[in-house]
Amino acid sequence: MLPAMTKVAPAIAIMAAATVLGGCATKSYVREQVAPVAQRVDAIETQLQATDSTAKQALAEAQAASGMAQQNGQRLDQLNGRVDGVEQRMMQQESRGKRPRH
């Protein structure tokens, strides 16, 4: 939000200058000078909100993907355990001279 504050600084400087000069600057003149700056600030705030929304959506998707990856890792671990068990039974049956049952 620091960049947005940087954009507001010229508007504040214009208002301060208008105040220091006293009656030299009319309210309409100050409004004319501040209006473009205010419009730019509004545009930047809109862009910042869009960027923030996109970042939050990307974070949510990344967290969902991480959860899915963890679930898949757990499933793989379970399958590896089953495969190891099947291999051990096959080796035991082969060492006994028996063929595996189907």
Image (spheres, rainbow, N blue to C red):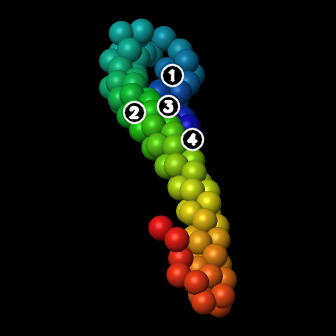
Q: At which x and y percent is residue 20? A: 57, 22
Q: Amino acid at mark 2?
A: Ala
Q: Residue at x 47, y 27 (%)?
A: 11
Between circles 4 and 1, the one closer to the viewer is 4
User: Gap in Å between the C-alphas at discs 1 and 3?
Assistant: 11 Å
Report x, y in % for residue 90: 58, 79
Q: Which residue is pictured at 59% across the width and 72% down the height?
A: 86
Up-down relation of residue 77 to residue 27 (above or below): below
Q: Which mark is residue 8?
A: 3
Tell me how far mark 2 sits from mark 3, CA to CA: 20 Å
Badge 2 density bin: few <14, some 14–19, many ≥20, Cα 10 Å: few
From the viewer's side, name the closer residue of 44 and 99: 99
Residue at 55% x, 37% y: name it.
Answer: 1
> Element under label 3?
helix
According to the picture, the residue beneath numbered tag 2 turns out to be 50
Front position among marks 1 and 3: 3
Foreground residue, 82 or 98?
Answer: 98
Proximity of marks 2 and 4: CB atoms separated by less than 8 Å: no
Q: Quadrant of residue 39?
A: top left
Inspect the image, locate mark 4, and give the three-letter code of the amino acid beneath it: Leu
Looking at this view, is 22 or 53 the one in front? 53
7 vs 85, left or right, is: left
**Residue under circle 4?**
2
Residue drawn where x is 65% and y is 90% of the image: 95
Instruction: Give the numbered dot on residue 15.
Output: 1
Does residue 73 appear in the picture of this structure? Answer: no
Q: Secondary structure at mark 2?
A: helix
Disc nearest the viewer among 3 and 4: 4
Q: Indicate which disc, 1 or 3, sits on the residue closer to the N terminus.
A: 3
How far apart, in angstroms, are the residues tagged by discs 3 and 4? 10 Å
Amino acid marked by disc 1: Met
